[in-house]
Image: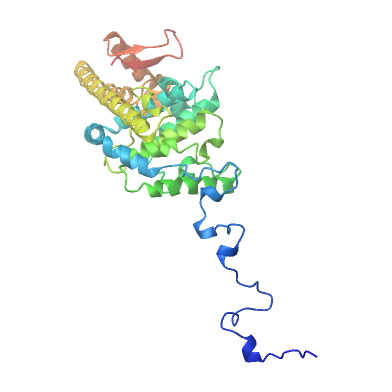
């Protein structure tokens, strides 16, 4: 009769099974497997993934590509910087009215590009007297007025973008905070780039961050352009904004790779800055000729009228009365004299509610 063999505890616990639990599978050599082991998650690659479409893992904004484009466009970037520095020097040496005139011109051109089509003269009347025609859109005038004010403000959009945009009274503040945070994150990654490149990047990432989701069609475009214009002069003392629309809309077109977008941006901003310099040249020449022609007139009203006509593209008698310390009769008499002298022109062609503009 066979007797069962008894095993001791030390005999059962071999070195191979000392660390195994009773529920652990027995170790098997890979040569004895009839299937290949599954991939390790740490070394998993696309060959072992499921045959399904994969999400695009590339970042929405490639800041490195913008940095490479900046290096390739160093020469035109330098030329734009020189033009912008010349504009800043001219504005610093000239009267404050020059900056106001350029801001009005830029805001009006931006409104045309956005589809509002607000002339500079109507914008000036809206800002001074809150006058609007029967066919004017009050919201369009308000948008253009916001642009003109923000182009001259000392507030910088990078300090507090939400306050700069003025959306505090609107709903969805939490959504706006997330959008501003996304914009700030991308701009923070681009701190090493030139301010002009940062301005172009800010304009082109506006729809990506979701900031263009409010305000219809015209408002986001104007907001993006104004923020970029203010951002582009961070390193240029004396320049209120980077002109973008004075020379046309070429720099504000979207589409293409970063190098194409930045090249269009630099070209458009260069044309706009040179247009701003030509405008200042015409204003300077007109003011000198007007003061020479009015030298024979007595009183303080003629030189004060010249200043108002220099600073605003369109002037009425009530507007001039609000700007200077003179009577309505004296203002009207001097306006008529300047019209006959060919210094200014009356633009309405009617007997009442007349407006005058400088003959540049």
Residue 54, given in percent of the width and then of the height, sits at 56, 43
Which residue occupies 25% across, 20% down?
A: 282
Which residue occupies 46% across, 21% down?
A: 118
Placement of the N terminus among the 4 image quadrants: bottom right
Count up the numbered dots: 0
Q: Quadrant of residue 170?
A: top right
The residue furthest front is 1
Q: Is residue 5 left or right of residue 169?
A: right
354 vs 245, nearest the viewer: 245
- Asked whether the viewer can see residue 155, the reply is no
Residue 194, given in percent of the width and then of the height, sits at 30, 42
Residue 238, given in percent of the width and then of the height, sits at 27, 39
Q: Quadrant of residue 307?
A: top left
Q: Quadrant of residue 34?
A: bottom right
Residue 78, given in percent of the width and then of the height, sits at 23, 35
Q: Is residue 296 left or right of residue 207?
A: left
- Asked whether the viewer can see residue 182, the reply is yes
13 vs 82, nearest the viewer: 13
């Amino acid at each position: 009769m066979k007797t069962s063999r008894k095993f001791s505890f030390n005999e059962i616990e071999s070195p191979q099974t000392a660390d195994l639990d009773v529920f652990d599978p027995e170790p098997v050599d890979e040569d004895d497997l009839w299937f290949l082991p599954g991939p390790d998650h740490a070394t998993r690659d696309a060959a072992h993934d499921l045959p399904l479409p994969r999400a695009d893992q590339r970042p929405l904004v490639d800041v490195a590509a913008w940095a490479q484009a900046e290096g390739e466009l160093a020469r035109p970037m330098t030329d734009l910087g020189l033009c912008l520095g010349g504009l800043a020097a001219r504005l610093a040496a000239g009267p404050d009215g020059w900056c106001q005139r350029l801001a009005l011109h830029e805001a009006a051109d931006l409104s045309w590009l956005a589809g509002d089509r607000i002339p500079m003269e109507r914008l000036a009347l809206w800002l001074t007297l809150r006058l609007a025609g029967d066919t004017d859109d009050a919201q369009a005038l308000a948008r253009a007025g916001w642009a003109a004010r923000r182009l001259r403000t000392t507030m910088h959009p990078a300090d507090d973008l939400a306050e700069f945009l003025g959306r505090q009274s609107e709903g969805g503040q939490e959504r706006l905070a997330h959008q501003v945070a996304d914009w700030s994150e991308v701009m923070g990654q681009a701190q090493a780039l030139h301010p002009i490149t940062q301005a172009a990047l800010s304009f082109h990432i506006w729809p990506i961050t979701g900031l263009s989701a409010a305000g219809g069609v015209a408002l986001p475009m104007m907001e993006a352009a104004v923020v970029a214009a203010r951002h582009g002069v961070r390193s240029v003392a004396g320049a209120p904004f980077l002109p973008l629309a004075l020379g046309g809309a070429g720099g504000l077109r979207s589409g293409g790779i970063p190098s194409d977008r930045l090249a269009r941006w630099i070209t458009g901003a260069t044309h706009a800055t040179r247009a701003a310099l030509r405008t200042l040249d015409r204003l300077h020449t007109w003011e000198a000729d007007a003061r020479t022609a009015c030298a024979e007139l007595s009183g303080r009203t003629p030189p004060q009228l010249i200043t108002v006509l220099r600073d605003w593209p369109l002037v009425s008698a009530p507007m001039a009365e609000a700007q200077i310390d003179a009577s309505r009769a004296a203002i009207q008499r001097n306006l008529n004299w300047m019209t006959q002298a060919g210094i200014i022109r009356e633009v309405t062609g009617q007997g009442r509610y007349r407006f005058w503009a400088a003959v540049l």
